[in-house]
Amino acid sequence: MSEERINIKDVTPKVKPKYTNVGADNHIYVRNMTGVFQRLRKYMGWFFMVLFLALPLFQWDGHQAILLNIAEQRIHIFALTIFPQDLMLLALLLIVGAFALFFITAYLGRVWCGFMCPQTIWTFIFIWFEEKIEGSANKRLKLNQGPVTTDKVKKKALKHSAWLSVSVITGLAFMAYFVPVFELYTDFFTLQASGNVYFWVLFFAFCTYGNAGWMRSIMCTHMCPYARFQSAMFDTDTLIVGYDFNRGESRGPRSRKADHKAKGLGDCIDCNLCVQVCPAGIDIRDGLQYECINCGACIDACDQTMERMNYPKGLIRYTSENELNNKPHEKSRFKLIGYGVIMTLMTIMFVVSVVSISPVQMDIIRDRNALYRENSDGNIENTYTLKIINKTSFTQKYSLSVTDVPDHEWFGPREIEVLPGELLVQPVSLAIDPFDLKQPVIKINFVITEQGNDHYVFTQQSRFISKL
Ligand code: SF4
Ligand code: SF4
């Protein structure tokens, strides 16, 4: 049997592989970039970082200005103290925050993600350390692909130590919003803190290290719910980072002096700088993608290329889909106005609720076992349990009284002292001569007066029941 070989011709189309900054290890090698938006992001990142670290250090009226004290069930936000009874305020605040985010997203796209989101801020801090220790994106790629050497181990150890230090500082600073800050820092470093505190600090440190060091854009694209539903707020007039396809195509390399238009080329020289700097690992020239966090790094990169080529800047720019398609750009849209109106209304509701919040609360529970009883003097007696909550941050003395009631005897203390945030349960009884009672049920009012502040009076209605 003769061996015949079949001639095979390779007909695979010679398509240039798509450029990407995602390595074979699925890691995104972000090239460092400077420019207007990178400076803006850096300054904003610093501002929010300093704010995050410094806010728990402020004191207000003898307590930590911002403290979510879970153990004592109260939240301090400067002059405002929220108890579980006022959680509605927190819900309102969250609704205001949500509508502010909807409004900003509909108007300015994902600027929150690009400039204010902690995930972005911490990721760029971690990339900064990576760049300083391991070098540029290319060097990092080579280092990761290369063999294990002493230099590689040293660099990796240094980088991870830096990341872990930032993570522990972050975990501690975050815990300072839940545990009084000075107590936390001294106890933590003198190894006197509770196991719970060590657990949570290390848990948040681990989350920071994992999210900003390893997960990065995976967090934004696969885990963040905002990334998923933000497209519902977008419309064709929302500000996006967009590539001017009409101006840029067809793309291709050329010399600076060449008349590219005569060659049928657009302004994109296909330098791939916009892809190299993208922390999301995408090519914005493929159109709007949900991975894009609107950080503007590709704008800075492309503007530098345009400047070098003596072309006008803005081939990639903050724009809208309508503007890119030469359609009129509508600034005031129904959706935007709707979000703005709801946000304003909710803000007004929140402010009104804060202003009218009562510093003391009283609930009255009537004795369920006996509606009334006749005492040894022949008077009708009703028993009540007063539940009084001092919602201020100070110990308060209150006077108790009752109004809209005929001549009566009061059994129970007339003055009480309630600690900050304490719920005091105080039984009291009222006895009335039956000849003074004209109806079987009369409406009465229990009154709390803050001692030393006669202007502040809190009234709560109840009933006095007799056998008539
Ligand atoms: S495409 Fe541009 S704006 Fe979007 S994430 Fe990448 S670099 Fe940032
Ligand atoms: S940076 Fe600008 S010129 Fe370079 S590839 Fe991107 S869009 Fe084209």
Image: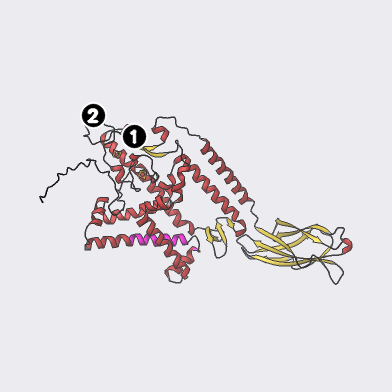
Q: Quadrant of ligand 2?
A: top left
**Reading the chain from its start, which is encountered first: label 1 or label 2?**
1
Count neighbours of disc 2 (C-alpha within 10 A) and say few if under 14, some if 14 to 19, many if 20 or more: few
Please name the colour scheme applied to the rendered image: secondary structure
The answer to whether residue 342 of the structure is visible from this angle is yes
Verify whether residue 403 appears in magenta.
Answer: no
Which residue is rendered at x = 21% and y = 62% of the image? 149
Q: Which residues are magenta?
A: 161-180
Q: Is residue 245 left or right of residue 143?
A: right
Check the image and name the residue furthest to the front. Answer: 1
Q: Which residue is disc 1 drawn over?
A: 245
Q: Which mark is residue 453?
A: none
Q: Which residue is disc 2 drawn over?
A: 263
Q: Position of residue 158 (x, y in %)?
A: 29, 61
Name the magenta segment's main secondary structure.
Answer: helix
Q: Is residue 5 left or right of residue 240?
A: left
